[in-house]
Image (cartoon, rainbow, N blue to C red):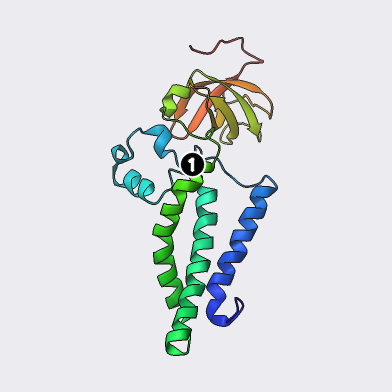
Amino acid sequence: MTLFEPHNLPFAAALAVMLILTLLQVIGLGDFDVDADIDVEADVGDPTSAGIGGAITSLLGLGRVPLFVWLITFLLAFATIGMSIQALATDLTGSPLYRWLAALFAAGASIPVTAVLARPIGALMPKDETSAVGLDSLVGKRGTVTTGRAAKGSPARTKVYDRHGQAHHVMVEPHEDASEMLEGDEVLLVRREGQTFFAVPLAERKLAPMS
């Protein structure tokens, strides 16, 4: 039994997508920042306080690792489990399962496996992505635009440090509609709406961050 046989098509595709995502991360195009996607631990101290959605997210392990890492882990588990199911079915019955039935079984098994693997993976990752502080506490802090150009309706990724010295990567738009902020600009976060922060460039306004 080989990976490229028809009954293994879903698992071959999963491995291909996993390799592409891994390559994107290696060359710096992947998103390893949990704050911009899912901020269960940073935004709420108790995952259950976010309701059913927060509890499910925590259960799946999405709050322990960035979404990009979670997807890579899930795809690897899906491909491995799926091929194992097909190999076992062939050994027991002499033929593999219908590929989409095997994919359904593999997907169901891969979710808890990925959630379990998220714990050790999260423990090994650098801790500058999340901290047990509310996002509102970042208002009044200095940040540096790291990716993109911030304009009205077009936020840019910005790195900001909380009171513990831990880094968060958040999406930032200018506080004033006519303003813009470029990569490398130092800014001051002045307010937050959902997952988006609004800031003023410190080069234009001589403002001091809140203590």
**Circle 1 crowding by C-alpha within 10 Å: few under 14, some 14–19, many from 20:** few
What is the quadrant of the N terminus in the image? bottom right
Q: Residue at x 48, y 88 (%)?
A: 95
Q: Is residue 108 left or right of residue 163?
A: left
Query: Pointer 1: what residue?
Result: 123
**Residue occupying the far bottom of the picture:** 94
In front of the other: 91 or 38: 91
Q: Is residue 14 left or right of residue 191?
A: right
Q: Amino acid at mark 1?
A: Ala
Q: Residue at x 55, y 37 (%)?
A: 126
What SS does tag 1 mark? helix
For the image, the number of numbered tags is: 1
Q: Residue at x 46, y 72 (%)?
A: 103
Q: Is residue 182 left or right of residue 139?
A: right
Does the rendering let one see residue 174? no
Q: Compared to 13, does 140 lie above or below?
A: above
Q: Residue at x 54, y 50 (%)?
A: 69
* Image quadrant assignment for residue 19: bottom right
Q: Is residue 97 left or right of residue 33?
A: left
In front of the other: 202 or 166: 166
Q: Give the percent coordinates (x, y) of residue 195.
A: 46, 35
Q: Compared to 12, does 122 lie above or below?
A: above
Does the rendering let one see residue 142? yes
Q: Give the percent coordinates (x, y) of residue 200.
A: 58, 20
